[in-house]
Amino acid sequence: MDPLARQTVLAIAAGRVAIGVGAVFATRPALKALGFGEIDATGTSLARIAGARDAALGLLALAAHDDHKALRLAVLAGAAVDAADAIAFGAAARDPVLRRAGLGGVGLGGAAAIAGAWAWRRLGNS
C-alpha cells in the first residue's frame, strides 16, 4: 500500500472525526469556528447530523487502515462527501450572511476532496 496515500487518508479521517465530534458535542463553538454566526435550532440539528456523518466516515477509514480495498472505498466515499460539501458551501457563500463560512467550507471541502481523490488514485496503484 502506498504509504503517503495511506497517511493522507488517515490524516483526513482523523480530522473528519475531530470535526464530527465537535459538531455533535460542541455544536455552537464548532459552527463559530467554521465561520457561522447565530445558529437556530434547525441549524444546530443539521450540524449535528452532518457531524455524526463525518465522524462515522472518519471512523470507517480509520478502521480500514490495514485493509487496502476497504480503505480505498472509504476514501472514495469521503472524497465524494467532501466534494458535495464544497458545492453546498459554495451555494451558501452567495448569501452575504453565510459568505465567510461558505468560502471557508469551499476551501476546506475542496482541499479534502482533492486530497482524497489523489489518495484514492494512488491506492489504486498499490
Image (cartoon, rainbow, N blue to C red):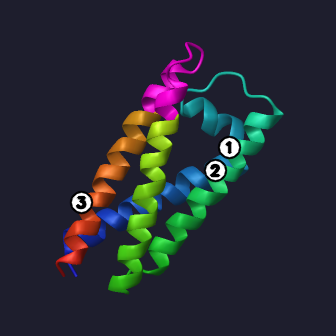
Q: Is residue 66 visible?
A: no
Check if residue 69 falls in the magenta segment. Answer: no
Question: Mark 3 belongs to which amino acid?
Answer: Trp
Q: Quadrant of residue 95?
A: top right
Query: Mark 3 — residue?
Result: 118
Q: Residue 73 appears at what percent x and percent y?
A: 41, 74
Q: Is residue 65 above or below residue 100?
A: below
Residue furthest out toward the top: 96
Residue 87 in sight from this viewpoint: yes
Quadrant of the image occupied by residue 110: top left
Instruction: Find residue 20 and report its image quarter.
Output: bottom right
Looking at the rendered structure, the secondary structure element under dot 1 is: helix
Taking depth in this image into account, of 32 and 87 the one nearest to the observer is 87
Residue beneath the point at 36% across and 51% down: 113
Instruction: Using the image as rendered, state which of residue 87 and residue 101 is in the foreground.
Output: 87
Residue found 36% across the figure and 50% down from its top: 112
Residue 62's label in the rendered image is none
Query: What residue did someone put label 1 on?
Result: 47
Residue at position x 46%, y 35% in the image: 105
Query: Magenta part of the protein: which range?
Result: 89-104
- Residue 116, how many percent across, how many down? 33, 59
Q: Amino acid at mark 2?
A: Ala
